Each structure stands twice: as structure tokens, then as C-alpha cells.
């Protein structure tokens, strides 16, 4: 399987994508980002589906950055506070558990004051190593 290169959230080659860069620190992935008006739902508010996609990618990248393909099996998302267009946000995701080929992860999106905007939990199926 070839390495993914057109991901909506993290690819640099997808002209309509978010072009996010995830960094791995120990068992956590992190990324700072700002969402522009093209991805709003209600006026001035970031669309919830965009935030869910960012969380899914952050949690999936826990294993992806180790060189594994991680397919989403299940994900639940809780929206706590609105996220505003143009607001600086940070997504964090960390490993909750890993058993056989199933990985459980938790993630959140916060503003720069640390206020939680969205929380998510997900399960991923580890397909195998990424071939370059």
C-alpha cells in the first residue's frame, strides 16, 4: 500500500484541503490551525464536520506517524463550545489503548486559552505498515 498523499486534512497537494501538519510528541499528536470562512457552517462558526475530520486525522496520525495505516472503525464526537472562523485552535490526540490490531484514541480541540471546543474518541483498525 502506498503512502497517502491527497488527504483532505493533512495533504499539501490537495488544493481544497486544510494542509495541516501534525507533530508527534511521545504518544500524542499535536497541530495548531486556523479555519477560514470557506469551511464555516453557520456564519462565523466552523462547520462541525470539519472539526470532526481534524480530530479523526489527529487520532489516526498517532499510528500513521509510526508508519502504519490506521482505518477509522468508530468515532464519537462531542461539541462543547463553538469554534470560530479565524480563531487559533490546537488539536491534540493520544493513545488510550492498543490490543492486537485495534487502537483506541482520544482527542480534543482547544482554543489558545485552553478552552475545550470539541472532544472525540475513536477506534482504528491497523491494516499494516505503509510502503514508501
Image (tube, rainbow, N blue to C red):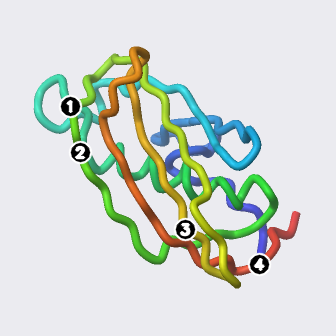
Q: Are marks 4 and 2 in contact (CB under 8 Å)?
A: no
Q: Earlier in the sequence, mark 3 or mark 1?
A: 1
Identify the element where label 3 is drawn.
Answer: strand
Image location (x, y in percent) of residue 128? 77, 78
Q: Residue at x 33, y 25 (%)?
A: 115
* Above-or-below relation of 71 to 115: below
Q: Earlier in the sequence, mark 1 or mark 4?
A: 1
What residue did someone put label 2 on?
A: 79
* Above-or-below relation of 58 to 113: below
Q: CA distance from mark 1 to mark 2?
A: 7 Å
Frontmost of labels 3 and 4 is 3
Is residue 132 shown left or right of residue 54?
right
Q: CA distance from mark 3 to mark 4?
A: 16 Å
Q: CA distance from mark 1 to mark 4?
A: 36 Å
Q: Residue at x 33, y 17 (%)?
A: 86
Q: Residue at x 70, y 84 (%)?
A: 100
Q: Earlier in the sequence, mark 3 or mark 4?
A: 3
Quarter of the N terminus within the rendering: bottom right
Q: Are marks 3 and 4 in contact (CB under 8 Å)?
A: no
Per the rendering, the mark at residue 82 is 1
Q: Nearer the viewer, residue 50 or 59?
A: 59
Per the rendering, the mark at residue 107 is none
What residue did someone put label 4 on?
A: 128
Badge 2 density bin: few <14, some 14–19, many ≥20, Cα 10 Å = some
Image location (x, y in percent) of residue 103? 61, 71
Identify the element where label 1 is drawn.
Answer: loop
Amino acid at each position: 500500500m502506498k503512502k497517502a498523499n491527497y488527504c483532505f486534512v493533512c495533504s499539501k497537494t490537495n488544493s481544497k484541503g486544510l494542509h495541516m501538519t501534525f507533530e508527534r510528541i511521545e504518544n500524542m499528536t499535536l497541530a495548531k490551525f486556523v479555519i477560514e470562512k470557506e469551511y464555516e457552517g453557520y456564519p462565523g462558526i466552523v462547520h462541525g464536520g470539519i472539526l470532526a475530520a481534524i480530530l479523526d486525522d489527529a487520532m489516526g496520525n498517532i499510528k500513521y506517524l509510526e508508519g502504519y495505516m490506521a482505518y477509522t472503525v468508530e468515532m464519537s464526537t462531542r461539541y462543547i463550545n463553538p469554534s470560530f472562523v479565524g480563531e487559533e485552535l490546537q488539536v491534540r490526540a493520544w493513545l488510550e489503548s492498543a490490543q492486537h490490531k485495534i487502537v483506541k484514541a482520544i482527542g480534543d480541540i482547544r482554543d489558545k486559552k485552553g478552552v475545550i471546543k470539541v472532544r472525540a474518541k475513536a477506534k482504528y483498525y491497523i491494516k499494516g505498515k505503509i510502503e514508501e
